Image (tube, rainbow, N blue to C red):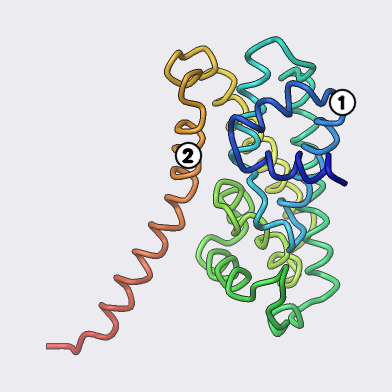
């Protein structure tokens, strides 16, 4: 249990995560797959650091001194992401509209679900692709698609494109930036930058909603 706690705590620190991924061997593969799967479609996985995890995994692969290999790991994690979204879809399909009336709990926030729902209303099926790059929304988007009874074949097409694009892009970013000296010596800052960029879509959506709300509340002249 102590080892598990050490690994989990290390997920939220770039330097510790780099050390863990370099030294845990095949166990790192299993944990990475489990986290990507959970964050992609299980409602309690919204707090997991998917973007930073993929970036650091790519970075560690670029060092060439660990058991993590980019060409092996990236396809495996893409499959985990696709499978996670599919699990979220079928969970939403099974629970249906009742999921929107679920009370808040330790691992569930209705406000997160509603954000994904609003995102889905604006972007339709493309939400499944866009949401991959938006923390929290990517966890709840497949659940919303399932609850809304989106055609599964159509969902799967978007799911496959989004899952492959997300994993290969973020991991590739870490892999190719691994040769940059500044990134090597400022991994924590590089990860924070990736997280900030991934939160940018949420900030823009919030700003748009705020401006629309102000425009609709202003009296006509």
Image position, residue 202 (x, y; %): 46, 57
Query: Which quadrant holds the C terminus?
Result: bottom left
Quarter location, residue 95:
bottom right
> Which residue has dot 2 on it?
192
State the SS at label 1. helix
Residue found at x 68% / y 79%: 104
> Which residue has dot 1 on it?
26
Residue found at x 62% / y 43%: 12
Image position, residue 137 (x, y; %): 59, 59
Give whichever of discs 1 and 2 has the lower sequence position: 1
Image position, residue 138 (x, y; %): 63, 54
Quarter location, residue 8:
top right
Image position, residue 28 (x, y; %): 80, 31
Residue found at x 83% / y 66%: 91
Front residue (pair 45, 168): 45
Residue found at x 34% / y 64%: 207
Front residue (pair 159, 45): 45
């Amino acid at each position: 249990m102590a080892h598990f706690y050490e690994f989990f705590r290390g997920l939220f620190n770039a330097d510790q995560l780099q050390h863990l991924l370099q030294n845990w061997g095949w166990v790192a593969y299993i944990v990475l797959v489990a986290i990507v799967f959970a964050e992609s479609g299980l409602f309690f996985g919204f707090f997991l650091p998917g973007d930073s995890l993929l970036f650091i995994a790519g970075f560690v692969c670029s060092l060439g001194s660990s058991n993590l290999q980019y060409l092996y790991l990236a396809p495996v994690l893409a499959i985990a992401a696709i499978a996670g979204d599919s699990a979220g879809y079928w969970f939403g399909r099974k629970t249906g509209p009742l999921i929107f009336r679920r009370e808040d709990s330790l691992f569930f926030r209705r406000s997160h679900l509603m954000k994904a729902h609003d995102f889905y209303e604006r972007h339709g099926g493309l939400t499944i692709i866009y949401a991959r790059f938006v923390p929290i929304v990517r966890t709840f988007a497949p659940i919303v698609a399932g609850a809304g009874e989106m055609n599964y074949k159509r969902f799967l097409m978007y799911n496959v494109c989004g899952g492959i694009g997300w994993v290969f892009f973020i991991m590739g970013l870490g892999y190719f930036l691994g040769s940059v000296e500044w990134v090597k010596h400022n991994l924590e800052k590089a990860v924070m930058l990736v997280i900030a960029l991934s939160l940018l879509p949420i900030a823009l959506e919030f700003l748009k909603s705020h401006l629309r709300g102000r425009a609709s509340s202003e009296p006509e002249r």
